[in-house]
Structures are given as C-alpha cells and as structure tokens.
Image: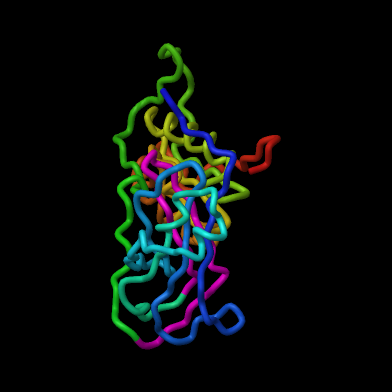
Amino acid sequence: MMIPVSSHPLMGAFETADNDGQLLATTRLSGWVWHPEFTIADVVLLFGDIGVPVQFGLERPDVATRFSSQPQARFCGFITRENFPRGRGPIRLQVTTQCGRTYFLDAKLDAHLETGAYLPPRAPQEMWELSTLPKRPAPFLNSVPCSRGPLNILFMLYGDFTSNSANHVAAFSNQLIARGFDCIVAVPEHMETIGAQARARFLAIEFKDLANLPSYYIAMVRDRHSSTRGPRVNWFENSARG
C-alpha cells in the first residue's frame, strides 16, 4: 500500500471585497489555489451546507510570476460559475487531489444572503449513514468469547477530520462497526472535512449536534440489551495533538 505524505500545505487565496469578514451581497467569488506536490482534480466551494460549483484551471499570470518555480501556479485560478445563492454560513474551498487527498482553504468569510438563486443542500455522503446492523455478539480477536459491550460509542475529537488523531479514530470506529457496534465521531466544527477519511463508515457530527445525540441512536433503543441512556463517550487525544 502506498500512502502519499506531504510536508507542504495547500497554497491559495480568495479575492473578495468583503465587509469585515462578512459577504452581504450575492456575487461571484474568485481566487487561486495550487499544491506544490499534488495535482488538483476537483474544487468545490462550501457555503454552509451548500456546495457551489466552481470553474477551476483559469490562467493566472500574476500568480505564475509570484511563484515562478512552480509550473502548476500558472493555471490555478478559480471562480464560482454563478453568483452566490441565498443562504448563510462560513465559506471554504474544498480541494481534492488526483491521489485522493482532501484540503480546505478557509476564506475567513461568512455570508448572509437573503437574495439570490436557491441551491439545495449537499446530499449526505453514504459514509455518514448510521450503521443499523442486526443484534449479534461482538467477536474480537480470534473470536475469543467475551462479555457483550455497549453498542453505542461516541468519539469526540479536539480537531476536525484532517487531524492526525482523526486517522486513528477512523480506524478504531471502522473496526468497531465491523464487530457490531455503532459509532459516532464528533468534531468541534467543520464536519465537512469527513472527506479526508475516505474509508469512514461512522456518522460524523459537530459538537453543536450533541444535544440531539439520543435520536442518532434510536435504532439501538429497540434492542433491549442496549442502554437508552446514551453512548459510551471516548475523548481522543494523542501525544501529537492533532
């Protein structure tokens, strides 16, 4: 197995005429983005829970001049295909490379737009769906008999899904789900970074959604062996912290 590892961050910038970090009028957003090592395959602009289509690959001679040693800097321009739709929320650029890595460029910009076209929210990805596996014992290594454990498990991360800790939690959760448990992983914000965990099988939520936690486990309440008091909570932090 080959895992691409990069020591270089995503390079890019938004070009906006904002008002103290607030976008108050519908417009097209533009900017530039490139990566020193990986080829960019897809770009989408995230606006709250909406994905705004972006045209990418525009020629930017000014950026090419600034980064003259980087050939990918010449065709790194982007612009939204249409004016921003109505809605509210933070703005970020989601960048996916040809090797499958996901990066985010933060515009440090919120929008509150009461006019403009309507775009439906992004459809939840399949990997966000809660597993509803039938009731069964939870076999562990070599099928050694063991007592039945709690079926509802919640992991809480200190960072988003691009952090180093998220890689470990994703692996733990996937294995627990394969053994009959149901897992939810909560992050403080930026739930959309779940795209960085391509093999995730768990449900991703943000801390603000924890008040609704019992409803996420409603399928397990029907199991008289599971607890209706909520999940077992696991805070996760390693020595690298994120």
Q: Residue at x 30, y 59 (%)?
A: 123
**Residue 83: x and y, percent?**
35, 79
Tally of numbered tags? 0
**Residue 60 to residue 213: above or below:** below
**Residue 37 to residue 23: above or below:** above
Range drawn in magenta: 89-115
**Residue 190: x and y, percent?**
51, 58
Does the segment drawn in magenta span residue 98? yes
**Considering depth in this image, is 180 or 114 the residue closer to the camera?**
114
Does the segment drawn in magenta span residue 158? no
Q: Quadrant of the C terminus?
A: top right
Q: Residue furthest right?
A: 239
**Residue 65: x and y, percent?**
53, 60
Task: Classify residue 214 as left or right of residue 21.
Answer: left
Q: Residue at x 45, y 45 (%)?
A: 196
Q: Residue at x 57, y 84 (%)?
A: 19
Q: Is residue 74 visible?
A: yes
Q: Residue at x 49, y 46 (%)?
A: 185
